[in-house]
Amino acid sequence: MELDLSHPSITDLRKTARKRIPKFAFEYLDSATGRELGLKINRDALDKIGFMPSVLCGRTTANLQTTIMGQKFDLPFGVAPVGMSGLLWAGAERLLAKAAVAHNIPFSLSSVAVASPEDVAPYIGNNGWFQHYPVNSSELRRAMLPRIKDAGFHTLIITVDVPEESRRERQRRANLTVPPKTDLRTILEMIRCPSWCFAHLREGIVPRMRFFDDYVPVRGRQSFTHAGALIRGIPDWEYLDELRQEWDGKLIVKGVLRPEDAKRMVALGVDCIWVSNHSGRQFEAGPAVIDQLPKIREAVGGHVPLIYDSGVSWGLDIMRALAYGADFVMLGRAFQFAVAAFGAKGIDHLVHVLKADIQANMSQLGAESTDQLSNYLLGENSRPPKEWYGFGG
């Protein structure tokens, strides 16, 4: 099958993934909170951002190499952390890490992934980032950080927009537990997906949060209560300040929407701000993330790297975020759809789809560098060029 003909978009990968994985796994990945208005708000705001093409530019060659926090990547996008990725497809974390190194893009491992840091360590090269969910004691945190560093993860992402568990209604109806229940309903869902079952049999492990599990005693744990729920902490400014002092690598804060919060984080020594609303998975009544991006850029100035995620479904969306002030864009669901649909081949195909879409659209504009994209913004959406903010790569 020629994937570029049968699956030319992320939407196509999503459809195939839905057929190949059990309903409880798909609903976990695909759902948002409440009525899922957050998804619509993000999508509508992105669609309002247009560009004014230039003509008679001759043949242009888009340079997509991007430097962030001192490291050069071949593309301006990477793999965002997704919890329980190895439940969605067996060995997904390893496959994604290997592909990220092959394409020279960052790979982020969630602390609530199926794979442990040590499992993925042989495959991350110098491209590994680790996502840290706050835990409920400083002693526990201080036990985790050296282990993360020893596994080769030089960049830490603290996610701060999950103070409590959200009510993802589709996920609740799907009755997902970690590890999955062995009731008749769940077993029938798994049987209907033989490729998914065989992949997990080959992997030979029961999907669970292996990193967090190591810090939670099995005895006394309630049935189907996952380790993440038992050691979850609620982040505050003191937690962030202590983490900055304890972690001697690059530190990213993920889940920022308020410009004043971003400024305070920079003052605490945070290296990068990740502008995100968890793709609508935590709260549905907030602003569109893309609308907050230029406000945060203006607040922190040009010297602070900004990452964007939430609602990215095309290469054109990546361009929109870069034009609005982001240095880099991360995708979560899209990479999971890709690996669930076609394994390693699906990840390579997704990278090709995004890269080709960006190159084609930049050719239409006559732009040769992502730094130029803000100059092509249409009408009321126009923003000053990155040089105005003092961007220096």
Image (cartoon, rainbow, N blue to C red):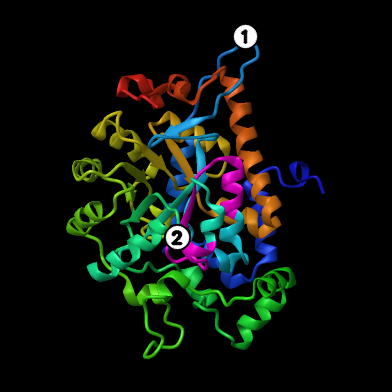
| Percent x, y of residue 364 | 60, 21
Mark 2 surroundings: few (<14), some (14-19) or many (≥20) residues within 10 A: many
Label 1 sits on a secondary structure element that is loop
- Amino acid type of the residue that numbered disc 1 sits on in the rendered structure: Leu
Q: Residue at x 74, y 41 (%)?
A: 4
User: In the image shown, does 381 or 118 lie closer to the viewer?
Assistant: 118
Where is residue 376 drawn, in percent x and y?
47, 20
Horizontal side, residue 132 vs residue 194: left or right: left
Task: Specify the quadrant of the image occupied by residue 258.
Answer: top left
Label annotation for residue 110: 2
Image quarter of the C terminus: top left
Q: Distance between the residues labelled 1 and 2?
A: 46 Å
Q: In which quarter of the image is residue 85?
A: bottom right
Magenta span of residues: 96-119
Q: Where is residue 290 in the image (x, y as percent from the top left)?
A: 40, 40
Task: Please check the rendered image and state whether residue 264 is part of the magenta-colored stretch, yes or no.
Answer: no
Q: Please tell me in which quadrant of the rendered image residue 34 appears.
A: bottom left
Residue drawn at x 36%, y 90% is 220
Q: Are marks 1 and 2 in contact (CB under 8 Å)?
A: no
Which dot marks residue 56? 1
**Is residue 240 left or right of 88 when viewed as pictured?**
left
Where 376 falls versus 97 (above or below)? above
- Residue 104 belongs to magenta span: yes
